[in-house]
Image: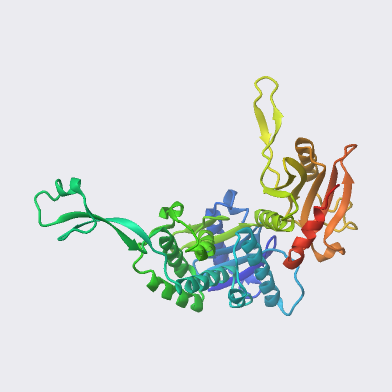
């Protein structure tokens, strides 16, 4: 089994060196799976570039699994230099899981986290372990059940008689009664989703511990109707105070079955991918953490809100070029701050007077300021050590001769305990 780990925007050469290279046949199979992903773009190039001498990772992170080979792509997150490369990768996996937990509103307790094997397992096996441990724990309190309506032809009456069926289909067989009754059953949508997740993960996991747990779970769900992921009835799941503990499991199942952040399954054995676009993940993480930071302040945070149009035709009033700012901060109906998140490394000032900020990004923020009549515009990047400064505002600028201000800023996601404090500082009012 070929297993390799690669950082986003890095490449791995073809060859037989087990530490620094990947066999050509494995690269071919992984690239084929990437081409099938809905996130892959043209020829899978948004995930992997299949070059002459190397396989290159692009802007997606996660796992690509093909026959007898696995490629893990990790994000570039600054973490403390602790131990060897495996220890560093383990810390980055831990940070990535934290980003996912916040973006998906997951409650990952300390007990589960300590058992996840950050250094020895790849991201997929960690997520499978998290899901299986939480599911085993939930089942200790019982499997969800709900009353469902049944129809059955019985020798004695149960429930109520179905007159239509009795005097049509059973007219020639009066010894049987067409019964309709309610029965408390575990064969309901939420359990069918759990079984579908177990079945899929049992096929793709390579970890003996995960395989053992999934086999035990498969036995527990043996009486639940097997369904394909496409046929699952997510809209029928009803969460209330009696089964609220299943909220996190549903979110994990949705992720692992491809209902969030995009995934693709290429046949039963040929391939599987679980991929996250870091731009989207970073945006959701910042937005949710900002909500926590501004809780109780009278300010509200809106992700992908606004939706105002840039242009309106003079004749028929038809509007074009709709805008979707990443994050809007409002005080009532007033937009007081617009934040656009960028998952890329802003350059140190000594290297680039513009700090690597795209001119098109600046123009976009100027348009947002005009359209939403907003005085504070913020381009927010992940912090990194090369900036040689503390996280926060890196540059303050006036937009032309207007009263609008554009801030370039960074946030250190490696230290999630201080993220709320950093974001609160970026949204200090008045201007």
Q: Residue furthest bottom?
A: 83
Q: Residue at x 58, y 55 (%)?
A: 261
Q: Is residue 193 visible?
A: yes
Question: Residue 96 at x, y = what percent?
Answer: 66, 65
Compared across the picture, whether 316 is left or right of 363 comes to left
Residue 2 location, x and y as percent? 56, 72
Left or right position of 227 against 390: left
Residue 218 rendering spot, x and y as whole percentages = 40, 71
Can residue 415 be seen at all in this image of the molecule?
no
Expressed as whole percent of the image width and height from the top left, the position of residue 282 reads 69, 57
Q: Is residue 428 left or right of residue 17?
A: right
Task: Write the residue at 65% across / 60% down.
Answer: 57
Examine the rendered structure and indicate whether residue 317 appears above or below residue 7: above
Up-down relation of residue 382 to residue 222 (above or below): above
Q: In the picture provided, is 302 more to the left or to the right than 207?
A: right
Residue 47 image-quadrant placement = bottom right
Residue closer to the observer: 43 or 207: 207
230 or 100, nearer to the observer = 100
| Number of marks in the rendered image | 0
Most extreme residue toward the top, as rendered? 315
Residue 54 lies, with reference to residue 335, above or below; the image says below
Query: In this view of the protein, which residue sits in the foreground, 390 or 305?
Result: 305
Q: Which scheme is used to colour this image of the protein?
A: rainbow
Residue that appears at 42% across and 65% down: 144
Instruction: Return the residue nearer the eye: 11 or 223.
Output: 223
């Amino acid at each position: 089994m070929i297993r390799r780990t690669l950082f986003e925007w890095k490449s791995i050469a073809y060859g037989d060196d087990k530490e620094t290279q990947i066999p050509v046949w494995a690269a071919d199979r992984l690239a084929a799976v990437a081409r099938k992903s809905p996130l892959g773009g043209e020829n899978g190039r948004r995930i992997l570039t299949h070059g002459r001498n190397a396989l290159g990772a692009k802007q997606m992170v996660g796992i690509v699994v093909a026959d007898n080979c696995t490629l893990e792509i990790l994000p570039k997150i600054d973490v403390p230099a602790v131990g060897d490369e495996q220890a560093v990768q383990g810390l980055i996996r831990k940070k990535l899981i934290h980003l996912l937990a916040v973006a998906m509103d997951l409650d990952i307790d300390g007990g589960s986290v300590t058992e996840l094997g950050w250094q020895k397992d790849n991201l997929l096996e960690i997520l499978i372990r998290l899901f299986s441990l939480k599911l085993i724990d939930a089942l200790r309190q019982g499997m969800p059940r709900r009353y469902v309506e049944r129809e059955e032809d019985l020798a004695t009456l149960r429930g109520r008689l179905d007159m239509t069926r009795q005097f049509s289909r059973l007219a020639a067989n009066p010894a049987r009664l067409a019964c309709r009754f309610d029965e408390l059953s575990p064969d309901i949508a939420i359990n069918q989703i759990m079984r579908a997740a177990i079945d899929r993960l049992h096929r793709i996991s390579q970890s003996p511990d995960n395989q053992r747990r999934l086999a035990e779970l498969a036995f527990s769900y043996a009486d639940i109707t097997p369904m394909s992921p496409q046929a699952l009835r997510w809209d029928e799941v009803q969460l209330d105070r009696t089964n609220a503990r299943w909220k996190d499991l549903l979110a994990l199942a949705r992720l692992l079955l491809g209902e969030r952040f995009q995934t693709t399954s290429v046949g039963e054995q040929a391939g599987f991918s679980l991929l996250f676009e870091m731009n989207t993940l970073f945006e959701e993480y910042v937005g949710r953490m900002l909500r926590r930071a501004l809780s109780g302040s009278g300010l509200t945070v809106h992700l992908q809100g606004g939706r105002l149009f840039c242009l309106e035709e003079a004749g028929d009033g038809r509007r074009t070029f709709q805008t979707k700012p990443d994050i809007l901060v409002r005080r009532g109906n007033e937009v007081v701050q617009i934040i656009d998140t960028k998952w890329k490394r802003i350059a140190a000032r000594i290297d680039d007077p513009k700090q690597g900020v795209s001119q098109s990004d600046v123009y976009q923020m100027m348009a947002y300021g005009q359209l939403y009549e907003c005085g504070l515009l913020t381009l927010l990047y992940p912090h990194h050590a090369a900036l040689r400064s503390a996280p926060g505002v890196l540059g303050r600028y006036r937009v032309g001769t207007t009263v609008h201000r554009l801030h370039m800023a960074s946030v250190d996601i490696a230290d999630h305990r201080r993220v709320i404090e950093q974001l609160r500082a970026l949204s200090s009012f008045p201007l």
